[in-house]
Amino acid sequence: MIDFVDIQKLGFKKESAHDPVYENQYGRPYWYMTFYAKIVCMGYTNEIIFNWDCDTRNVKVFRNEKFLVEFEKFEDFINFFSLFESE
């Protein structure tokens, strides 16, 4: 599991989603943390989206809205995420 504080330190932002079924089941609104990265290279752009789920505490990665990979361990995730950090 990947902790909230680690995700927050990386610059992820909190987003909410309206899901009445979720709210009835868990008694709270659904929220998650997200981070957007764009890769521009010789005439094309890839949008990379990282979503951290507050229930599973995993990060799912999407490229151009298509699922790419899911990370459960922070060490594995940070190795991948460091490719997108600016210096």
Image (spheres, rainbow, N blue to C red):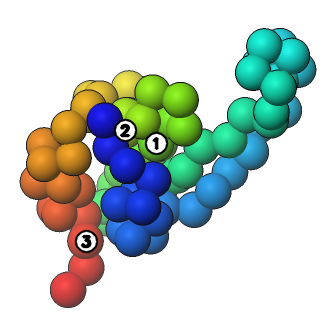
Q: Give left or right: position of 8 versus 6.
A: right
Name the residue that disc number 2 marks.
59
Query: Which tag is nearer the camera, tag 1 or tag 3?
Result: 1
Q: Name the residue under label 3.
A: 85
- Of mark 1 and mark 3, the one earlier in the sequence is 1
In the image: residue 53, left or right of residue 27: left
Residues tagged 1 and 3 counted as in contact (Cβ below 8 A) = no
Residue 26 seen in this snapshot: yes
Give the CA distance from mark 2 to mark 3. 16 Å
**Residue 53 or 86: which is nearer the viewer?**
53
- The residue pinned by badge 1 equals 52
Type of amino acid under label 2: Val
Marks 2 & 1, CB-CB < 8 Å contact: yes
**69 over 51 or under it: above or below:** above
What residue sits 86% from the left and 16% below the top? 24
The residue at 42%/61% (across/down) is: 5
Which label sits on residue 7? none
Horizontal side of 21 relative to 57 (left or right) equals right
